[in-house]
Amino acid sequence: MGTSDTAVDPVNSLKRGFLNAKLKSYMWYRTRPNIVRGLFLLVIASLFLISRVNITIEFSSDTVTSATESEEIKRTKKVMRLKELLNPRYPILLDLDGIRDPNPVNLEEYKKELFKENMFNTWVSDRTPLNREHPDARTGRCVERAKTYIPVSEMPTVSVVFIFVDECLSVLLRSVISIINTVPARVLKDIILVDDASKKLENGQRLEEEVMTFDGIVKLVRHKERKGLMIARTTGAQHATGDVVVFLDSHIEATMGWVEPILDRISKNRKTVIQPNIPAIDFNTFDLAYDVIDTPDAHSIMGGFSWDMVFRWKSLPEREMKRRHGDNSVEVLSPTMAGGLFAMDRKYFFEIGAYDLGMDIWGAENLEISFRIWMCGGVLEINPCSTIGHVYRQTFPYSSKKDVGLKNGKRLAEVWLDEYKEFFYQISPPAKEVDMGDISERVALRQRLQCRSFRWYLENIYPEMQVPSRDFLAHGEIRNMGDRNRCVDNLGGWKPPSRVGMYSCHGQGGSQYWQYMKYTNEIKQTHNYDYCLDAISDDQIQIASCHGQKGNQHWTLTVVGELKSANGKCLSHDGSFIILQKCDGSARQRWNWGFVFVKPS
C-alpha cells in the first residue's frame, strides 16, 4: 500500500492501457512509452498480451447477448467485465497529462500548492493506484453474521450517489472504482456523479472522458451553478434507479463486504437508515487506519449534537452497550448521524421528505434528517460490519456564505425542536435576525407524516442529551461585572490544553458560551461537553478534559456572582487571562451569566 513520489512506471502505464482497452482504454492513446526503454517494453507488453488472450476472448463472447436477454443480465455482465478490467492485481495509475505540471520549477512548493488546493496530499493521491484493494475489514463476528444475510440474488439493487465540487480527479475516480470492485455485479444498478458547478479543469472534459470508460454504469450530472449538498444529493437520488440509494462523499474507499450488511438490514425494514463504520484514510499518506477497525472500542460511539445544532460524536451510553450484549458486530442505534455517508430505501427517502431544500450549501442537514427519521417512524443505525474509509481533511478547501449555518439551524429549530428551540437561540443569538425563508412546506410535511414531539425524541432516543433547563445551573456568556464589556473567552483554543482569557463581549455565543453543570459543578464549553474549565494553578486556568473528580474542575457560584474554586479562591482576571485570587469582594471577581436557572448558594 506504500506510495512513492517517483515518476509513473512505464510498465504500469502499459498494463493500465491494456486493462482499460475494453473500457475505451483509460486514455491509452495518451500514454507515451519511454523511447530509451521502447524495445524492452515491447517485449514485456507482448508477453503480457499473450497471457491475457483467453480473458479477452471471454470478454468478447460475453458481449454477444440474445434479443430476449433481460436488461438486468446485460447490466450485470457489464459490471462483471468492469470488475475484471479493474482488478487490483494490475494497478491503474491516473494519466496526469494535461492536469498536472510535469516539470514544476520547485517540486516541494508545487506539492504544497496541490495540498492547499485540496487540503490533502494530492501528490501522493495522484501516484496511488486507482483500483487498489484493501484487506477485509470485518471482524470475526461480522464474518459469521454474513452467513445469515439474505442471498445476494434476493438483495435489493443499489445506486451510489457522489456529489462533488472541484474534487481531485484521482480521489474521485478511486472512490468510484472502489464501489465497482466491492459491490456484487447483480446488485450495482448505477453510480451517479453530481457535479455541483466545479471550476477545475480536471472536472471538465477530462472527467467526461473518464466517465465514458465505465460503459454506462457511471452517470455524470452537472449543475450550472452551485446548489449545495441538499439539492445536489436530491438531484442524484432523482437520477438513481436502484432500490436503495447510498450517499457518499467523493473522497472515500469502500472495503469488501460493506454493502451486504446494509442491504440485508434495509430488506428487513425499509425504514432503516444506515451509516457505515468510517475509519480514516490518512490525508497525507492515503493509508487506511486498519488499527481502529477491529478493536474493543472501535464501535463504541454514536452520533449526538449540541444545542447550536452541530453534530458531535459521543461515547455509547450504558443502556446501548447492554442492548448489544458486548457484541461489537451488533448495529448501534444512533440518535444522529454525521451525514456524509449513509444508505436508505430510495422511495422512503422521498416519502419522508428527502432533504430540506430551503437550506443552503451544507450544515445542520444531517441533524434535520436524523431527527426526522426517528420522530417520523424510522430507525437510524451505525453498522459496524460495513466499512468505508474516508479522507478527513484538515479543513475545507472551499468556502460558503457566512450565515449558512445559522439559517439552516434556524429552519431545523423552528420545524422540529418545539419548545426546545429556545436553547438554540440562547446559544446562537444572531440566528434570531437571520432570514430563514419559508418553512410552511416542512411544517406541513411533519404534520402529514404524523411525527412525534421533540420531547419524545429526547426521552426515548437520546435521554443522555443534556437539557439546559434541567441539567444546567447557568449557561451563556460569563460577563465580568468590573469590566462589563469583557467576557470569558476560549481565545480560539477549542481543544485542551488551551488557556482561557478575556475578550470583548460579542454576543455571538461560540467561544464565549459556557455551561455551569447542575450535578457536577463543572463549567463546560458548549461545543464539546467533554472539555471543562480547569484551574491547574492560580495564574493559569485552561480547557482540559473533564475528569468528573471535582478538584480543580469544581466551581461554586455565590449569590454575589463569585465563582469559587475548590481551594476557596475566586475567579478573577489580569486584563488578558482569567486567574485565581484571594476573594476580596471586588467587581473584578464577580460574574454575570447569560441565563441562570437555579438561585446561587
Image: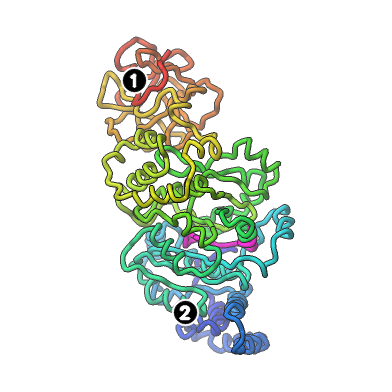
Q: Residue 385: x and y, percent?
A: 64, 55
Asked if 541 appears above or below 222 in the picture, the reply is above
Magenta-tinted stretch: 247-261
Residue ID for mark 1: 591
Residue under the image location 49 percent in, 58 percent down:
349
Asked if 465 appears above or below 311 in the picture, the reply is above
- How far is disc 1 from disc 2 in space, using C-alphas? 65 Å
Instruction: Indicate the quadrant containing the C terminus: top left, top right, bottom left or bottom right.
Output: top left
Which image quadrant for residue 46?
bottom right
Asked if 540 appears above or below 456 in the picture, the reply is above
Residue ID for mark 2: 212
Q: For the residue labelled by badge 1, is the local secondary structure a helix, a strand or a loop?
A: strand
Which comes before the other along the chain, label 1 or label 2? 2
Q: Residue 226: x and y, percent?
A: 33, 62
Please tell me whether residue 418 belongs to the stretch shown in magenta.
Answer: no
Residue under the image location 51 percent in, 83 percent down:
25
